């Protein structure tokens, strides 16, 4: 991609930048050298889903009630954006025991005719000077770097990729009803939650459930990711991004509920997919936001990697998190995500605030 095209795709500010919000992320990745000029690939040559077609969780669609509680949110010792650790108090709420699945999302679409962000045709008028062939509906895919080089790009924007075709335009979700739905932007997740008469969880709600009422590094006893060699979450084993040994039996996405539930009876709050929250993102917690915290407002939201673009908090880490690259498979971990961007490793679950 030449410099002129880069500049036209990556405006620093203005109306165009706001209308097509997935591009800031691509611009940052290109600027950082993580995406080469092959960004708009015809189709990714990979399969990052698990070959295991089993349905791990038999009962789909359940919720559990989480009692109101006081806990220490955040972490002062790992990544800067997780600090400061501070005490917060939450009211009780119901939470999905697993991520929203392909099957659940398909029912929502069937009843509403909803079209996700990745399926919508970008308006060329919003992007004057950008070649029309670059303005195609699509989403971002992870693939192992070609030739085993860690320096090569592992993300590609692929036209035709969306929640129905998560691994490439020719792929499908047939037989994968119980996999987490992916390639959903924040507004897609919000639309589903509204249809279901529920909400996206706040960052604090997600972290409380993920911690399973424990204050350690992980939501289980001890500070080991796989205590005794027993994997408790779907993460990356091996040297990211060139080799995944799949010691947890899943080289990519896993069906929901394939790992042990936590003490609340909820699954996959660590690993598998990152999950959207309701909160706008800021690079640090506000320690004064203590009672049912909601985080910053949209005007206060920013991320150093997406200057000028408000971003939401995602939580939980994913199957791409590895000790040598992304130690965000922890309850305290958090990251910023562009609201208009769906990827192959972001999903969501919902909550409902009501008495038991």
Image: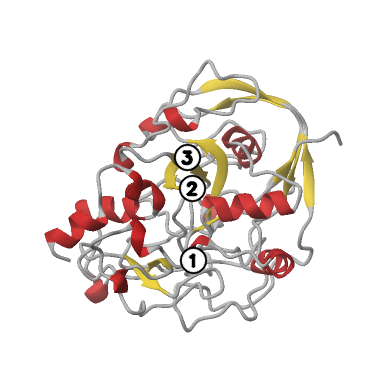
Residue on which the image places disc 3: 333
Instruction: Kindly give the residue lying farthest to the right in the view shown.
Output: 356
- Mark 2 or 1, nearer chain start: 1
Q: Which mark is residue 329?
A: 2
Label 1, label 3: how far apart the Cα atoms are: 31 Å
Q: Is residue 104 above or below residue 302?
A: below
Residue 154 image position (x, y, % from top left): 31, 65
Residue on which the image places disc 1: 120
Instruction: From the image, state whether disc 1 or disc 3 is nearer to you.
Output: 1
Label 3, label 2: how far apart the Cα atoms are: 7 Å
Judged from the image, the secondary structure of the residue bearing numbered disc 3 is: loop
Instruction: Kindly give the residue lying farthest to the left in the view shown.
Output: 3
Tell me if I can see residue 334 in this picture: no
Residue 116 image position (x, y, % from top left): 55, 63
Instruction: Kindly give the residue lying farthest to the top in the view shown.
Output: 288
Question: Residue 22 occupies which quadrant of the picture?
Answer: bottom left
> Label 3 neighbourhood size at 10 Å, few (<14), some (14-19), many (20+)?
many
Residue 32 image position (x, y, % from top left): 21, 51
Q: Nearer the viewer, residue 215 or 41?
A: 41
- Mark 1 or 3, nearer chain start: 1
């Amino acid at each position: 991609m030449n410099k002129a095209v880069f500049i036209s795709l990556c405006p620093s500010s203005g109306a165009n930048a706001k209308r097509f919000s997935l591009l800031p992320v691509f611009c940052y990745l290109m600027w950082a050298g993580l995406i080469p000029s092959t960004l708009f690939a015809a189709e990714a040559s990979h399969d990052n889903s698990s070959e295991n077609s089993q349905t791990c969780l038999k009962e789909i669609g359940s919720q559990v009630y989480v009692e109101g509680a006081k806990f220490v949110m955040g972490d002062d010792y790992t990544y800067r954006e997780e600090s400061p650790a501070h005490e917060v108090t939450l009211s009780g709420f119901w939470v999905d025991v697993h991520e929203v699945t392909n099957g659940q999302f398909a029912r929502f679409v069937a009843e509403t005719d909803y079209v996700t962000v990745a399926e919508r045709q970008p308006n060329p008028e919003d992007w004057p000077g950008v070649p029309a062939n670059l303005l195609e509906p699509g989403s971002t895919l992870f693939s192992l770097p070609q030739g085993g080089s860690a320096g090569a790009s592992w993300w590609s924007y692929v036209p035709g990729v969306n929640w129905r075709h998560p691994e490439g335009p020719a792929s499908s979700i047939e037989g994968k009803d119980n996999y987490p739905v992916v390639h959903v932007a924040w507004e897609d997740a919000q639309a589903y939650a509204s249809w279901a008469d529920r909400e996206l969880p706040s960052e604090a709600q997600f972290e409380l459930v993920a911690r399973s009422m424990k204050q350690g590094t992980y939501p289980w006893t001890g500070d080991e990711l796989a205590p005794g060699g027993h994997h408790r979450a779907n993460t990356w084993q091996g040297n990211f991004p060139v080799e995944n040994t799949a010691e947890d039996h899943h080289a990519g996405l896993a069906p929901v509920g394939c790992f042990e539930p936590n003490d609340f009876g909820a699954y996959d709050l660590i690993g598998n997919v990152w999950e959207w929250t309701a909160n706008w993102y800021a690079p640090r917690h506000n320690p004064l936001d203590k009672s049912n915290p909601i985080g910053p407002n949209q005007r206060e939201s920013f991320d150093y990697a997406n200057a000028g673009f408000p971003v939401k908090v995602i939580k939980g880490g994913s199957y791409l998190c590895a000790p040598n690259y992304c130690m965000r498979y922890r309850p305290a971990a958090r990251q910023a995500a562009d609201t208009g961007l769906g990827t192959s490793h972001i999903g969501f679950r919902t909550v409902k605030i009501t008495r038991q």
